[in-house]
Amino acid sequence: MGFREHLQDVCNGVDGAVACSLMGVDGIEVDTHVVPGSDLDVKSLLVEYTSVLRSARDAAEAHQAGGVSEFSVATDKLTAVARLISPEYFMVVALRPEGNAGKARFLLRVTAPKVVSEL
Amino acid sequence: MGFREHLQDVCNGVDGAVACSLMGVDGIEVDTHVVPGSDLDVKSLLVEYTSVLRSARDAAEAHQAGGVSEFSVATDKLTAVARLISPEYFMVVALRPEGNAGKARFLLRVTAPKVVSEL
Protein backbone atom coordinates (compact mmCIF):
# COMPACT_ATOMS: atom_id res chain seq x y z
CA MET A 1 0.00 0.00 0.00
CA GLY A 2 1.56 3.31 -1.05
CA PHE A 3 1.39 6.80 0.43
CA ARG A 4 -1.46 7.76 -1.84
CA GLU A 5 -3.72 4.96 -0.63
CA HIS A 6 -3.18 5.96 3.01
CA LEU A 7 -3.99 9.59 2.20
CA GLN A 8 -7.09 8.50 0.30
CA ASP A 9 -8.19 6.29 3.22
CA VAL A 10 -7.98 9.26 5.58
CA CYS A 11 -10.12 11.38 3.22
CA ASN A 12 -12.66 8.57 2.86
CA GLY A 13 -12.95 8.24 6.64
CA VAL A 14 -13.53 11.92 7.43
CA ASP A 15 -16.84 13.66 6.75
CA GLY A 16 -16.13 16.91 4.91
CA ALA A 17 -12.51 16.09 3.99
CA VAL A 18 -11.32 17.75 0.79
CA ALA A 19 -7.64 16.69 0.75
CA CYS A 20 -4.93 14.86 2.64
CA SER A 21 -1.21 15.49 2.12
CA LEU A 22 2.10 14.05 3.17
CA MET A 23 4.50 16.99 3.36
CA GLY A 24 8.08 17.68 4.25
CA VAL A 25 8.55 20.30 6.95
CA ASP A 26 10.54 22.19 4.32
CA GLY A 27 7.22 22.76 2.51
CA ILE A 28 7.82 20.26 -0.24
CA GLU A 29 4.85 18.03 -0.87
CA VAL A 30 5.49 14.29 -1.06
CA ASP A 31 2.01 13.25 -2.13
CA THR A 32 -1.58 14.53 -1.92
CA HIS A 33 -4.99 13.05 -2.41
CA VAL A 34 -7.56 15.69 -3.36
CA VAL A 35 -11.25 14.81 -3.19
CA PRO A 36 -12.78 15.92 -6.52
CA GLY A 37 -14.97 19.02 -6.48
CA SER A 38 -13.05 21.35 -4.14
CA ASP A 39 -13.19 24.96 -5.28
CA LEU A 40 -10.18 26.12 -3.23
CA ASP A 41 -6.56 25.73 -4.24
CA VAL A 42 -6.10 23.33 -1.33
CA LYS A 43 -2.70 22.02 -2.34
CA SER A 44 -1.09 25.47 -2.34
CA LEU A 45 -2.72 26.36 0.95
CA LEU A 46 -1.39 23.21 2.61
CA VAL A 47 2.10 24.00 1.37
CA GLU A 48 1.69 27.46 2.84
CA TYR A 49 0.69 26.03 6.21
CA THR A 50 4.17 24.55 6.49
CA SER A 51 5.29 28.00 7.55
CA VAL A 52 2.70 27.87 10.33
CA LEU A 53 4.19 24.61 11.55
CA ARG A 54 7.68 26.06 11.43
CA SER A 55 6.73 29.13 13.42
CA ALA A 56 4.95 26.93 16.01
CA ARG A 57 8.03 24.76 16.26
CA ASP A 58 10.33 27.73 16.68
CA ALA A 59 8.08 29.18 19.40
CA ALA A 60 7.83 25.87 21.27
CA GLU A 61 11.55 25.19 21.08
CA ALA A 62 12.42 28.66 22.30
CA HIS A 63 10.34 28.02 25.42
CA GLN A 64 11.26 24.41 26.17
CA ALA A 65 7.73 23.30 25.43
CA GLY A 66 8.99 20.26 23.52
CA GLY A 67 8.39 19.26 19.91
CA VAL A 68 5.19 20.16 18.10
CA SER A 69 3.05 17.04 17.63
CA GLU A 70 -0.16 18.46 16.15
CA PHE A 71 -1.59 21.74 14.97
CA SER A 72 -4.80 22.95 13.40
CA VAL A 73 -5.99 26.13 11.73
CA ALA A 74 -9.65 26.92 11.08
CA THR A 75 -10.70 29.58 8.60
CA ASP A 76 -14.12 30.55 7.27
CA LYS A 77 -13.77 28.13 4.37
CA LEU A 78 -11.41 25.39 5.51
CA THR A 79 -10.07 23.63 8.57
CA ALA A 80 -6.61 22.04 8.41
CA VAL A 81 -5.56 19.41 10.94
CA ALA A 82 -1.90 18.39 10.87
CA ARG A 83 0.26 15.86 12.66
CA LEU A 84 4.04 15.54 12.70
CA ILE A 85 4.86 11.94 11.85
CA SER A 86 8.65 12.29 11.99
CA PRO A 87 11.09 15.17 12.46
CA GLU A 88 11.04 15.69 8.68
CA TYR A 89 7.46 14.94 7.65
CA PHE A 90 3.90 15.76 8.55
CA MET A 91 0.45 14.73 7.39
CA VAL A 92 -2.32 17.25 7.01
CA VAL A 93 -6.04 16.91 6.31
CA ALA A 94 -8.05 19.80 4.88
CA LEU A 95 -11.76 19.72 5.56
CA ARG A 96 -14.78 21.94 5.20
CA PRO A 97 -15.64 23.97 8.32
CA GLU A 98 -18.58 21.70 9.11
CA GLY A 99 -16.41 18.57 8.70
CA ASN A 100 -15.38 16.24 11.50
CA ALA A 101 -12.02 17.61 12.71
CA GLY A 102 -11.93 15.18 15.64
CA LYS A 103 -12.17 12.22 13.31
CA ALA A 104 -9.43 13.73 11.12
CA ARG A 105 -7.19 14.00 14.17
CA PHE A 106 -7.94 10.42 15.16
CA LEU A 107 -7.30 9.01 11.69
CA LEU A 108 -4.02 10.92 11.37
CA ARG A 109 -2.93 9.36 14.65
CA VAL A 110 -3.70 5.79 13.55
CA THR A 111 -2.46 6.23 9.98
CA ALA A 112 0.83 7.94 10.89
CA PRO A 113 2.69 4.73 11.88
CA LYS A 114 1.69 3.07 8.61
CA VAL A 115 3.01 6.01 6.60
CA VAL A 116 6.18 6.23 8.68
CA SER A 117 6.91 2.57 7.99
CA GLU A 118 7.05 3.41 4.27
CA LEU A 119 9.25 6.49 4.53
CA MET B 1 -17.02 41.51 35.36
CA GLY B 2 -13.56 42.30 33.96
CA PHE B 3 -11.34 40.50 31.47
CA ARG B 4 -9.50 38.72 34.24
CA GLU B 5 -12.63 37.08 35.64
CA HIS B 6 -13.58 35.74 32.20
CA LEU B 7 -10.07 34.33 31.71
CA GLN B 8 -10.20 32.76 35.15
CA ASP B 9 -13.63 31.24 34.44
CA VAL B 10 -12.26 29.58 31.30
CA CYS B 11 -9.35 28.10 33.29
CA ASN B 12 -11.71 26.88 36.00
CA GLY B 13 -13.91 25.16 33.44
CA VAL B 14 -11.18 23.24 31.59
CA ASP B 15 -9.48 20.18 33.06
CA GLY B 16 -5.72 20.61 32.75
CA ALA B 17 -5.80 24.34 31.94
CA VAL B 18 -2.69 26.23 33.07
CA ALA B 19 -3.40 29.71 31.69
CA CYS B 20 -5.82 31.80 29.65
CA SER B 21 -4.81 35.03 27.90
CA LEU B 22 -6.43 37.86 26.03
CA MET B 23 -3.89 39.02 23.47
CA GLY B 24 -3.57 41.52 20.68
CA VAL B 25 -2.67 40.04 17.30
CA ASP B 26 0.39 42.30 17.50
CA GLY B 27 1.64 40.02 20.31
CA ILE B 28 0.92 42.40 23.14
CA GLU B 29 -0.83 40.75 26.05
CA VAL B 30 -3.93 42.48 27.41
CA ASP B 31 -4.45 40.22 30.42
CA THR B 32 -3.62 36.67 31.53
CA HIS B 33 -4.81 34.36 34.24
CA VAL B 34 -2.18 31.76 35.16
CA VAL B 35 -3.19 28.78 37.28
CA PRO B 36 -0.62 28.52 40.08
CA GLY B 37 1.93 25.71 39.87
CA SER B 38 2.84 25.71 36.16
CA ASP B 39 6.54 25.03 35.57
CA LEU B 40 6.63 26.43 32.04
CA ASP B 41 6.96 30.10 31.16
CA VAL B 42 3.45 29.97 29.72
CA LYS B 43 2.98 33.70 29.28
CA SER B 44 6.03 34.09 27.06
CA LEU B 45 5.06 31.05 25.03
CA LEU B 46 1.57 32.43 24.39
CA VAL B 47 3.04 35.72 23.25
CA GLU B 48 5.26 33.75 20.89
CA TYR B 49 2.27 31.91 19.45
CA THR B 50 1.02 35.22 18.10
CA SER B 51 3.52 34.73 15.29
CA VAL B 52 1.87 31.38 14.56
CA LEU B 53 -1.47 33.11 14.24
CA ARG B 54 -0.01 35.75 11.95
CA SER B 55 1.58 33.20 9.65
CA ALA B 56 -1.71 31.23 9.52
CA ARG B 57 -3.56 34.42 8.65
CA ASP B 58 -1.11 35.35 5.93
CA ALA B 59 -1.34 31.86 4.44
CA ALA B 60 -5.14 31.82 4.52
CA GLU B 61 -5.46 35.31 3.06
CA ALA B 62 -3.06 34.53 0.25
CA HIS B 63 -5.28 31.63 -0.77
CA GLN B 64 -8.73 33.18 -0.31
CA ALA B 65 -9.50 30.76 2.50
CA GLY B 66 -11.07 33.52 4.58
CA GLY B 67 -10.14 34.80 8.01
CA VAL B 68 -8.59 32.53 10.63
CA SER B 69 -11.14 31.80 13.36
CA GLU B 70 -9.30 29.24 15.52
CA PHE B 71 -5.94 27.54 15.77
CA SER B 72 -4.28 25.07 18.07
CA VAL B 73 -0.75 23.80 18.62
CA ALA B 74 0.08 20.70 20.62
CA THR B 75 3.59 20.05 21.92
CA ASP B 76 4.93 17.37 24.26
CA LYS B 77 4.32 19.59 27.27
CA LEU B 78 1.50 21.94 26.36
CA THR B 79 -1.51 22.35 24.10
CA ALA B 80 -2.62 25.85 23.14
CA VAL B 81 -6.12 26.48 21.79
CA ALA B 82 -6.79 29.97 20.41
CA ARG B 83 -9.77 31.82 19.02
CA LEU B 84 -9.89 35.15 17.22
CA ILE B 85 -12.51 37.24 18.94
CA SER B 86 -12.11 40.36 16.78
CA PRO B 87 -9.74 41.41 14.00
CA GLU B 88 -7.37 42.79 16.67
CA TYR B 89 -7.69 40.36 19.58
CA PHE B 90 -7.61 36.67 20.34
CA MET B 91 -8.08 34.50 23.39
CA VAL B 92 -5.83 31.52 24.03
CA VAL B 93 -5.95 28.72 26.58
CA ALA B 94 -2.83 26.75 27.47
CA LEU B 95 -3.42 23.29 28.86
CA ARG B 96 -1.48 20.19 29.73
CA PRO B 97 -1.34 17.55 26.96
CA GLU B 98 -3.85 15.36 28.81
CA GLY B 99 -6.22 18.32 29.31
CA ASN B 100 -9.59 18.70 27.64
CA ALA B 101 -8.88 20.70 24.47
CA GLY B 102 -12.45 20.26 23.22
CA LYS B 103 -13.82 21.90 26.35
CA ALA B 104 -11.28 24.71 25.97
CA ARG B 105 -12.49 25.30 22.43
CA PHE B 106 -16.10 25.30 23.56
CA LEU B 107 -15.52 27.70 26.44
CA LEU B 108 -13.58 30.10 24.22
CA ARG B 109 -16.53 30.14 21.84
CA VAL B 110 -19.09 30.96 24.54
CA THR B 111 -16.83 33.39 26.44
CA ALA B 112 -15.69 35.35 23.38
CA PRO B 113 -18.85 37.48 23.02
CA LYS B 114 -18.66 38.46 26.71
CA VAL B 115 -15.05 39.56 26.33
CA VAL B 116 -15.77 41.37 23.05
CA SER B 117 -18.52 43.36 24.75
CA GLU B 118 -15.90 44.76 27.14
CA LEU B 119 -13.29 45.66 24.51
Image: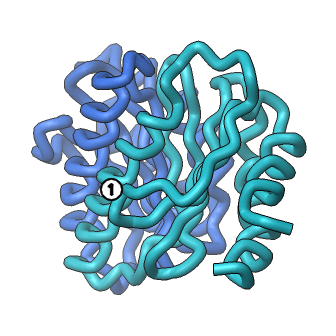
Chain colours: A blue, B cyan
Question: Label 1, on which residue?
Answer: A33
Res. B11 image quadrant:
top right
Mark 1 Cα within 10 Å, few/some/many (few <14, many 20+)? many
Residue at horizontal 26%, vertical 20%? A87
Q: Is residue B80 left or right of residue B103?
A: left
Amino acid type of the residue that numbered disc 1 sits on in the rendered structure: His
Spot occupied by residue A68 in the image (x, y as percentages of width and height):
40, 28
What count of labels does the image hold?
1
The one of A12 and B84 positioned closer to us in this rendering: B84
The one of B34 and A81 positioned closer to us in this rendering: B34
Residue at horizontal 74%, vertical 53%? B7
The one of A9 and A25 positioned closer to us in this rendering: A25
Q: Is residue B51 left or right of residue A72?
A: left
Res. A36 image quadrant:
bottom left
Q: Quadrant of the C terminus of chain A?
A: top left
Q: Is residue A81 above or below residue A87?
A: below
Q: Is residue B59 left or right of residue B37?
A: left
Query: Outermost residue, front direction?
Result: B2
Q: Is residue B89 above or below residue B51?
A: below
Whether residue A37 is visible, yes or no, is no
Q: Quadrant of the N terminus of chain A?
A: top left
Q: Is residue B108 above or below residue A22?
A: below
